[in-house]
Protein backbone atom coordinates (compact mmCIF):
# COMPACT_ATOMS: atom_id res chain seq x y z
CA UNK A 1 0.00 0.00 0.00
CA UNK A 2 1.20 3.57 -0.34
CA UNK A 3 3.71 3.71 -3.14
CA UNK A 4 2.86 0.00 -3.42
CA UNK A 5 5.64 -0.81 -5.85
CA UNK A 6 8.31 0.07 -3.28
CA UNK A 7 9.44 -3.04 -1.45
CA UNK A 8 6.86 -5.08 -3.35
CA UNK A 9 8.80 -7.64 -5.43
CA UNK A 10 7.66 -8.79 -8.86
CA UNK A 11 7.78 -12.53 -9.60
CA UNK A 12 7.01 -13.71 -6.07
CA UNK A 13 3.46 -14.99 -5.57
CA UNK A 14 1.72 -12.98 -2.90
CA UNK A 15 -1.80 -12.62 -1.55
CA UNK A 16 -3.51 -9.28 -2.11
CA UNK A 17 -6.70 -7.48 -1.17
CA UNK A 18 -8.26 -5.22 -3.79
CA UNK A 19 -10.71 -2.61 -2.53
CA UNK A 20 -12.98 -0.98 -5.13
CA UNK A 21 -14.23 2.49 -4.37
CA UNK A 22 -17.79 3.61 -5.01
CA UNK A 23 -19.39 0.45 -6.40
CA UNK A 24 -22.98 -0.58 -5.77
CA UNK A 25 -23.78 2.95 -4.64
CA UNK A 26 -24.70 6.04 -6.63
CA UNK A 27 -25.88 4.11 -9.67
CA UNK A 28 -22.67 2.13 -10.25
CA UNK A 29 -23.66 -1.53 -10.06
CA UNK A 30 -21.01 -4.23 -10.24
CA UNK A 31 -22.22 -7.75 -9.52
CA UNK A 32 -19.64 -9.78 -7.67
CA UNK A 33 -19.90 -12.71 -10.11
CA UNK A 34 -19.19 -10.30 -12.99
CA UNK A 35 -16.31 -8.78 -11.04
CA UNK A 36 -14.75 -12.21 -10.43
CA UNK A 37 -15.17 -13.03 -14.11
CA UNK A 38 -13.42 -9.84 -15.27
CA UNK A 39 -10.58 -10.19 -12.77
CA UNK A 40 -10.21 -13.84 -13.76
CA UNK A 41 -8.99 -12.68 -17.18
CA UNK A 42 -6.04 -10.88 -15.56
CA UNK A 43 -2.81 -12.46 -14.24
CA UNK A 44 -4.53 -13.08 -10.90
CA UNK A 45 -5.44 -16.42 -9.36
CA UNK A 46 -7.62 -17.49 -6.43
CA UNK A 47 -9.94 -14.52 -7.12
CA UNK A 48 -12.70 -14.28 -4.52
CA UNK A 49 -15.07 -11.53 -3.40
CA UNK A 50 -16.06 -10.61 0.15
CA UNK A 51 -19.52 -9.12 0.69
CA UNK A 52 -21.11 -7.13 -2.13
CA UNK A 53 -19.22 -3.87 -1.73
CA UNK A 54 -16.16 -4.40 -3.89
CA UNK A 55 -13.75 -6.35 -1.73
CA UNK A 56 -11.58 -8.85 -3.59
CA UNK A 57 -8.81 -11.25 -2.60
CA UNK A 58 -6.37 -12.80 -5.02
CA UNK A 59 -2.88 -14.16 -5.59
CA UNK A 60 -0.44 -12.73 -8.12
CA UNK A 61 3.21 -12.50 -9.08
CA UNK A 62 2.65 -8.86 -10.05
CA UNK A 63 3.30 -6.06 -7.60
CA UNK A 64 0.50 -3.94 -6.15
CA UNK A 65 1.06 -1.03 -8.55
CA UNK A 66 0.78 -3.28 -11.61
CA UNK A 67 -2.34 -4.97 -10.23
CA UNK A 68 -3.93 -1.57 -9.56
CA UNK A 69 -3.32 -0.41 -13.14
CA UNK A 70 -4.62 -3.63 -14.71
CA UNK A 71 -7.72 -3.85 -12.50
CA UNK A 72 -8.70 -0.20 -12.98
CA UNK A 73 -8.32 -0.52 -16.76
CA UNK A 74 -10.34 -3.76 -16.87
CA UNK A 75 -13.13 -2.29 -14.73
CA UNK A 76 -13.30 0.89 -16.81
CA UNK A 77 -13.59 -1.10 -20.02
CA UNK A 78 -16.09 -3.68 -18.76
CA UNK A 79 -18.34 -1.60 -16.47
CA UNK A 80 -17.85 1.81 -18.10
CA UNK A 81 -17.20 3.88 -14.99
CA UNK A 82 -14.21 5.76 -13.58
CA UNK A 83 -12.79 2.89 -11.54
CA UNK A 84 -10.45 3.46 -8.62
CA UNK A 85 -9.01 0.65 -6.54
CA UNK A 86 -6.56 0.28 -3.69
CA UNK A 87 -4.41 -2.84 -3.66
CA UNK A 88 -2.85 -4.04 -0.41
CA UNK A 89 -0.54 -6.97 0.27
CA UNK A 90 -1.86 -9.37 2.88
CA UNK A 91 1.01 -8.63 5.30
CA UNK A 92 0.42 -4.89 5.01
CA UNK A 93 -3.32 -5.26 5.59
CA UNK A 94 -2.66 -7.44 8.65
CA UNK A 95 -0.35 -4.75 10.04
CA UNK A 96 -3.01 -2.09 9.43
CA UNK A 97 -5.68 -4.15 11.19
CA UNK A 98 -3.40 -4.90 14.13
CA UNK A 99 -2.72 -1.19 14.63
CA UNK A 100 -6.38 -0.13 14.81
CA UNK A 101 -6.98 1.29 18.30
CA UNK A 102 -9.73 0.16 20.61
CA UNK A 103 -12.85 2.24 20.55
CA UNK A 104 -12.69 5.62 22.26
CA UNK A 105 -13.47 5.67 25.94
CA UNK A 106 -16.92 6.49 27.19
CA UNK A 107 -15.67 9.45 29.21
CA UNK A 108 -14.81 7.48 32.32
CA UNK A 109 -11.31 6.45 31.25
CA UNK A 110 -12.29 2.95 30.14
CA UNK A 111 -11.51 1.79 26.61
CA UNK A 112 -14.97 0.40 26.00
CA UNK A 113 -17.42 2.57 24.09
CA UNK A 114 -21.13 1.95 23.69
CA UNK A 115 -21.90 -0.83 21.20
CA UNK A 116 -23.43 1.69 18.80
CA UNK A 117 -20.00 3.15 17.97
CA UNK A 118 -18.41 1.62 14.85
CA UNK A 119 -14.76 1.54 13.86
CA UNK A 120 -13.79 2.45 10.29
CA UNK A 121 -10.53 2.14 8.38
CA UNK A 122 -9.83 4.48 5.47
CA UNK A 123 -7.15 3.24 3.07
CA UNK A 124 -5.25 5.74 0.92
CA UNK A 125 -3.31 5.16 -2.28
CA UNK A 126 -0.15 6.51 -0.66
CA UNK A 127 1.47 8.51 2.10
CA UNK A 128 1.22 11.83 0.29
CA UNK A 129 -2.55 11.38 -0.09
CA UNK A 130 -2.88 10.52 3.60
CA UNK A 131 -0.81 13.57 4.57
CA UNK A 132 -3.04 15.83 2.46
CA UNK A 133 -6.10 14.40 4.20
CA UNK A 134 -4.56 14.90 7.65
CA UNK A 135 -3.73 18.51 6.77
CA UNK A 136 -7.35 19.12 5.80
CA UNK A 137 -8.62 17.25 8.87
CA UNK A 138 -6.58 19.45 11.20
CA UNK A 139 -9.06 21.19 13.46
CA UNK A 140 -11.73 18.50 13.32
CA UNK A 141 -12.52 17.60 16.91
CA UNK A 142 -12.24 13.82 16.58
CA UNK A 143 -8.93 13.18 14.86
CA UNK A 144 -8.27 9.92 12.97
CA UNK A 145 -5.51 7.57 14.12
CA UNK A 146 -2.73 6.94 11.60
CA UNK A 147 -2.19 3.19 11.22
CA UNK A 148 0.82 0.98 10.39
CA UNK A 149 2.44 1.81 7.07
CA UNK A 150 1.16 5.41 7.19
CA UNK A 151 -1.29 4.85 4.33
CA UNK A 152 -4.45 4.26 6.39
CA UNK A 153 -6.34 5.82 9.28
CA UNK A 154 -8.89 4.57 11.78
CA UNK A 155 -11.84 6.61 12.99
CA UNK A 156 -15.06 6.11 14.92
CA UNK A 157 -18.66 6.95 14.18
CA UNK A 158 -22.00 6.40 15.86
CA UNK A 159 -23.98 3.62 14.18
CA UNK A 160 -25.96 4.95 11.22
CA UNK A 161 -23.99 8.21 11.01
CA UNK A 162 -20.88 7.07 9.17
CA UNK A 163 -21.53 9.42 6.26
CA UNK A 164 -22.38 12.58 8.16
CA UNK A 165 -19.63 12.88 10.78
CA UNK A 166 -17.03 15.58 9.93
CA UNK A 167 -14.30 13.09 8.91
CA UNK A 168 -16.68 11.26 6.56
CA UNK A 169 -17.76 14.54 4.97
CA UNK A 170 -14.13 15.46 4.40
CA UNK A 171 -13.43 12.04 2.82
CA UNK A 172 -16.42 12.54 0.49
CA UNK A 173 -14.81 15.60 -1.12
CA UNK A 174 -13.70 15.02 -4.69
CA UNK A 175 -10.10 15.67 -3.66
CA UNK A 176 -10.08 12.37 -1.78
CA UNK A 177 -12.59 10.38 -3.85
CA UNK A 178 -9.99 8.83 -6.16
CA UNK A 179 -7.35 8.23 -3.51
CA UNK A 180 -9.17 6.61 -0.59
CA UNK A 181 -11.79 4.07 0.36
CA UNK A 182 -13.36 3.29 3.72
CA UNK A 183 -14.35 -0.03 5.24
CA UNK A 184 -15.80 -1.07 8.58
CA UNK A 185 -13.16 -2.91 10.63
CA UNK A 186 -15.37 -6.01 10.48
CA UNK A 187 -15.04 -6.01 6.67
CA UNK A 188 -11.25 -5.66 6.92
CA UNK A 189 -11.17 -8.66 9.26
CA UNK A 190 -13.36 -10.71 6.88
CA UNK A 191 -11.02 -9.89 4.01
CA UNK A 192 -8.03 -10.91 6.11
CA UNK A 193 -9.77 -14.16 7.01
CA UNK A 194 -10.25 -14.98 3.34
CA UNK A 195 -6.63 -14.07 2.58
CA UNK A 196 -5.56 -16.72 5.11
Image (cartoon, rainbow, N blue to C red):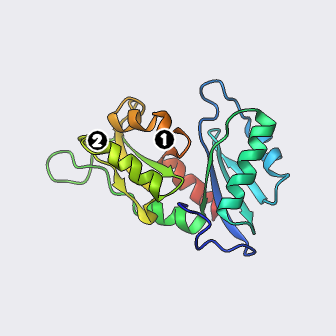
Q: Is residue 55 left or right of residue 41?
A: left
Q: Is residue 11 left or right of residue 99?
A: right
Q: Is residue 137 left or right of residue 162?
A: left
Q: Nearer the viewer, residue 113 or 42?
A: 42
What percent of the width, then of the height, locates residue 126?
51, 57
Assess disc 2: are there few (<14), some (14-19) or many (≥20) residues with their C-alpha within 10 Å of its C-alpha.
few
Q: Secondary structure at mark 2?
A: loop
**Residue 51, picture quadrant:** top right
Q: Nearer the viewer, residue 39 or 67?
A: 67
Q: Is residue 91 left or right of residue 102?
A: right
What percent of the width, then of the height, locates residue 125?
54, 53
**Residue 145, picture quadrant:** bottom left
**Residue 52, picture quadrant:** top right
The residue singled out by tag 1 in the image is 176
- Which quadrant: the N terminus? bottom right
What percent of the width, then of the height, locates residue 168?
40, 36
Residue appearing at x 59%, y 74% in the figure:
7
**Mark sitting on residue 114:** 2
**Does residue 9 lie above or below 120 as drawn?**
below
**Does residue 133 lie above or below 158 as drawn?**
below
* Total number of numbered discs in the rendering: 2
**Does residue 54 lie above or below 154 as drawn?**
above
Q: CA distance from mark 2 to mark 1?
A: 30 Å
Residue appearing at x 82%, y 55% in the figure:
42
What percent of the width, then of the height, locates residue 100?
39, 58
Assess disc 1: are there few (<14), some (14-19) or many (≥20) residues with their C-alpha within 10 Å of its C-alpha.
some
Q: Is residue 103 visible?
A: yes
Q: Secondary structure at mark 1?
A: helix
- Which quadrant: the C terminus? bottom right
Residue appearing at x 48%, y 41% in the figure:
176
Q: Is residue 185 visible?
A: no
Amino acid sequence: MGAPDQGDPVGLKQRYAIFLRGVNVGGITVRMADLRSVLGTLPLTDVATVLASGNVTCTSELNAAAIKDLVEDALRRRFRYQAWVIVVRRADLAAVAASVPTRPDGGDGTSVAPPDVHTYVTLFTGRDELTAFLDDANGIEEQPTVLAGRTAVAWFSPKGRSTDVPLAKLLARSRFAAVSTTRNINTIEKVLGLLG
